[in-house]
Amino acid sequence: MSTAAEQIVVMGVSGSGKSTIGALLAHALAVPFLDADGLHPQANIVKMASGVPLTDADRWPWLAQVGRALSDAGAAGTGLVIACSALKRVYRESIVAAAPNVRFVHLTGTFDVLGNRLEGRSEHFMPPALLRSQLATLEELQADEPGFAVDIDQPAVNAVTESVARLGAPELPASVLIGVGAGGLPVVRVNGRAGAAEVYLQGAHVTSWSPAGTCSVLWMSEFSEFAPGKPLRGGVPICFPWFGPHETDANAPAHGFARIAAWHLVQAREVGDDVELVFGLTDLRPAWPHCFEARYTVTVGAQLCLALQVRNLDDVSVTFAEAFHTYLSVPDIHAVSVSGFEDLGFIDRLAEPPARDAEGHPVAVAGETDRIYLGTNAEARIADGTGRTVSISTKGSQSRVIWNPWSAKASAMSDFGTEEWTGMVCVETANLMSDQVSLAPGETHTMSAVIAQTF
């Protein structure tokens, strides 16, 4: 998202935290901040300090100053976040008339939350007694106005995180919301007719997917660390542009930077009963010395459809590995079998030598498992012993991985519960090793997977 000329009004009644959140938001967007209270003429300040509500005649000159400040910032290309009550629609329309590109962030809260905040203030010329008057005057931001509402009953930093994510998002259908998830990270929540899901903007990480009327098909560790720059344990991490440790840089993040990078939501739309989200990621040099563009499409419904498109924007060829490191939830790993690879040899990364011949039967996960199947796009079928089967079909993928850490390795992981390994299995869609993708300048490659379950 380009923030250079952002024109934002953080609005709401007294006690909503306009100044605090506005200043933090301006810092996050790297633009100046202005408190519109400083634009009031002295006569207005005296009236408010005396407990006398302002009239519209008092407000019009002040609102003209607000609109002028935003318009000037837009023309200068500097951008501006301004804290302003903007209680009535007609007030906001006057601001829009002066600054057509302005957007409003409406801070909302209950009377009790607002009142408690006002009572805790020491130096402010708005007495708590005027809160009811302001709430009576308030005309809430409407759907046809430019902006959105943010609930203030959360830490200020979370309100800012949500605001930044929503300012950078496209217009959203009713089935899609952007909010703050675990650890204060921005999350896209989908509640469609055919299924629900959560996708964190960090890593474009799908953490849950539930077909209508069912529980999540994906597994997430209860010990996963939700924090900026930390990979999440579970769901569907995107591994790109390398898999596992970096070949030459021991300090580089395992499985590449895509799963910890800040993606942005490019598009959200309803397609029949499904909801389609498109996320974007661009050049992250020096983490990877190539210019590229990635688009990740997540379609939520009775099936979960994932498609990662990578375009080489560099003037030299690039080669990369990629994977959907999919964690599936199962009742008991001891009852799980994975079929589709019976006639294929594989690489056992726990054995020496690692090359293994085809076994002729489904994979029974009976201990620590770390297998790579190369040169195949066979459909994987995961039977969990209860009559349920999860299938994963792919396009543009020539490698598959089956992984479970088992007890000893799980116990050594800080983000993996001691017994959690019994409730998950990873069956991954990938292009690894000899199946890595090479793209000439301007070329594009798409790897996709469709996850479904039957009973």
Image (cartoon, grey):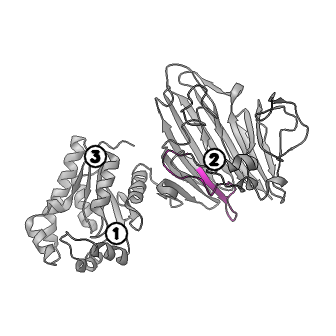
Residue in the foreground of this view, choosing between 77 and 232:
232
Residues under numbered marks 3 and 1 in contact, where contact means CB atoms less than 8 Å apart: no
| Helix, strand or loop under label 2 | loop
Q: CA distance from mark 3 to mark 1?
A: 26 Å
Residue beneath label 3, please? 31
Which residue bears the numbered disc 1?
140
Describe the element under mark 3 as helix, strand or loop. loop
Residue 201 rendering spot, x and y as whole percentages: 51, 48
Q: Is residue 217 magenta?
A: yes
Picture residue at 49% right of the left edge, 23% below the top: 314
Disc 3 crowd rating (10 Å Cα; few below 14, some 14-19, many 20+) is many
The image quadrant that residue 219 belongs to is bottom right
The range drawn in magenta is 206-230
Instruction: Say which amino acid is labelled 3.
Output: Val
Q: Amino acid at mark 2?
A: Val
**Percent of width and height locating residue 159:** 40, 59
- State the residue in front, 191 or 160: 160
Q: Is residue 297 visible?
A: yes
Q: Residue at x 91, y 38 (%)?
A: 360
**Which is nearer the N-term, disc 1 or disc 2?**
1
Picture coordinates of residue 272 (x, y %)? 61, 55
Where, by quadrant of the figure, is residue 93 drawn? bottom left
Name the quarter where the C terminus is drawn.
Answer: bottom right
Three-letter amino acid code at disc 1? Glu
When the figure is inspected, residue 318 is found, relative to residue 208, above or below; the finding is: above
Indicate the position of residue 313 as horizontal and vertical percent values: 50, 26
Q: Is residue 143 visible?
A: no
Which labelled disc corresponds to residue 236? 2
Residue shown at the point (70%, 39%) measured from the top left: 429
Q: Residue furthest right?
A: 360
